[in-house]
Amino acid sequence: MLCVWAVKDKVGKYAEATHLLHKQLLEAISESLGLEKNYLQEQSEEGSQVIAVNCYPSCPEPEVTLGMPPHSDFGSLTILLQSSEGLQIMDSNKNWVCVPYIEGALIVQLGDQVEVMSNGIYKSVIHRVTVNKHVKRLSFASLHSLPLHKKISPAPELLDGDNAAAYGEFSFNDFLNYISSIDDFLQERFIDTLKKSSS
Ligand SMILES: O=C(O)CCC(=O)C(=O)O
Ligand SMILES: [Fe+2]
């Protein structure tokens, strides 16, 4: 019992720390886009945070399988801690690049919601997870999202005559409806369905 409480306390503190870090990162991203410092954070107010613990057992034939298939995260940002290498991101030439393991380092992945709000100035990162023949891998993902029914669209300050909105508006709920309505949501990323044809 003591052990359960100790873990609960640690995970609770971790969730609080990543919640604060998410806020600070959104402020930095807002400023980098030339928006009000609080713009993205205000959009994200009353949003959700989920801590997912992923376990990838060692696998006798790592070359024929994946721990997690390619996807981008639907939310604003994902803050990730990994126990060993395994995460790969797709670069602009569509090559898979290994994210190195650095003890204690946090990995920040930009999600679809920030891609849309930045009108595509930032792109969400496509990533996948490989498995290892000998090593079991754990990852702790803090997944942050805007509120379920909040409509998300490009920040109006980023739009002018030369820069039209490159994405239609959507909510997290629209995303959930999308993935429950199709057979294989990995075939087409939800964000691609929002892109306007001129983009
Ligand atoms: O295990 C990882 O490194 C990534 C996990 C992930 O992509 C996710 O939870 O969305
Ligand atoms: Fe992910």
Image (cartoon, rainbow, N blue to C red):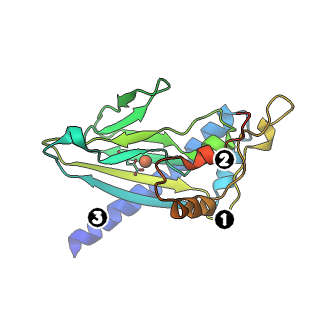
Quarter that holds the C terminus: top right
Q: Residue at the location (84% across, 34% down)?
A: 160
| Badge 1 residue CB within 8 Å of ligand 1 | no
Q: Amino acid at mark 1?
A: His
Which residue has dot 3 on it? 7
Q: Residue at the location (57% across, 59% down)?
A: 178
The alpha-carbon separation of the residues under discs 2 and 1 comes to: 16 Å
Which residue has dot 2 on it? 194
The alpha-carbon separation of the residues under discs 3 and 1 comes to: 32 Å
Quarter that holds the N terminus: bottom left
Q: Amino acid at mark 2?
A: Leu
Counting residues from the N terminus, which is met first, the one under dot 3 or under dot 2?
Answer: 3
Q: Residue at the location (49% across, 44% down)?
A: 72
- Residue closest to the eye, 169 or 48: 169
Identity of the residue furthest to the right in this view: 161
Residue 57 lies, in percent from the top left, at: 19, 52
The alpha-carbon separation of the residues under discs 3 and 2 comes to: 40 Å
* Residue 92 shown left or right of residue 35 in the figure: left
Element under label 3? helix
Residue 169 lies, in percent from the top left, at: 72, 52
Which residue has dot 1 on it? 149
Counting residues from the N terminus, which is met first, the one under dot 3 or under dot 1?
Answer: 3
Q: Is residue 147 visible?
A: no
Look at the picture and state if 89 lies above or below 45: above
Element under label 2? helix
- Residue closest to the eye, 40 or 174: 174
Residue 180 lies, in percent from the top left, at: 52, 64
